Amino acid sequence: MATDNQTPATSAPKPVAGASRVDRTTPALPVTEDTAGGRTTIADGVVAKVAGIAARQVAGVYALGGGGARALGAIRSVVNADDLTQGVKVDVGETQAAADITIVVEYPVPVHEVAANVRAAVTSAISSLVGLEVVEVNVEVNDVHLPSDDNTEEESRVS
């Protein structure tokens, strides 16, 4: 008794190198009072700033960005020139956005909970404040901040 269990092999389309994560095509909108008056373009920097502010407000997030970015950010904050987009990279299309957020988590807050809360906060902020559909928010936890890191007074080697 022979059975033919062969099915044609199919695979999901593979992303093209350098391809965007968001749909950058212009949707065909009907002409209404809202769209007849002109076109609104939202810069990538606006979306990045909204995402950065939302991520910083999550409990358990100590800072945004990797080591080098945080060092540069410390210099900026001394001269009152904070960069709210530090640690944030976004791709913005006509109707969609995607974000990559790099964070430092405070110890002993559960890292997976902080990452999930950052993802939810960033998605909510971009959707409600900017009006774009969020297709993905990737969270990279770069470091864990220990409370003892704040108390790093060096002892004098001479008396």
Image: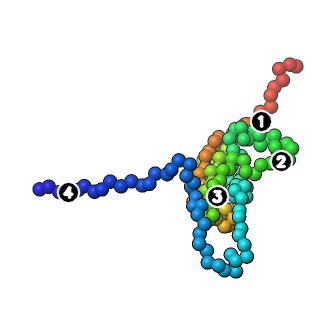
Q: Residues within 10 Å of mark 4 (few under 14, many from 20)?
A: few
Mark 4 is on which residue type? Asp
- At label 1, counting other C-alpha atoms closer than 10 Å, the crowd grade (few under 14, some 14-19, many 20 or more) is few
Upstream in sequence: badge 1 or badge 2 = 2
Q: Amino acid at mark 3?
A: Val
Instruction: Report if residue 113 is visible in the image.
Output: no
2 or 4: mark nearer the eye: 4
Q: Is residue 8 above or below residue 143?
A: below
Whether residue 76 is visible, yes or no, is yes
Whole-number angstrom distance, CA of label 3 to CA of label 2: 25 Å
Q: Considering only order in the chain, which callout, 3 or 4, is on the residue closer to the N terminus?
A: 4
Residue 151: x and y in percent read 77, 36
Question: Where is residue 107 shown, x and y percent of the image?
Answer: 66, 43
Residue 12 occupies which quadrant of the picture? bottom left
Label 4's element? loop
Q: Which residue is mark 1?
A: 151
* Residue at (62, 50) in percent of width and height: 100
Q: Which residue position holds label 2?
A: 81
| Residue at numbered disc 3 | 92
Colouring style: rainbow
Could you say where residue 42 lies in the image, as x and y percent from the top left?
Answer: 71, 62
Is tag 4's residue or tag 1's residue first in the polypeptide sequence?
4
Snapshot quadrant of residue 158: top right
Residue at the (20%, 57%) spot, across then down: 4
Q: Look at discs 3 and 1 and give the one toward the viewer.
A: 3
- Badge 2 marks a residue whose secondary structure is loop
Give the spatial CA distance, label 4 vs label 1: 70 Å
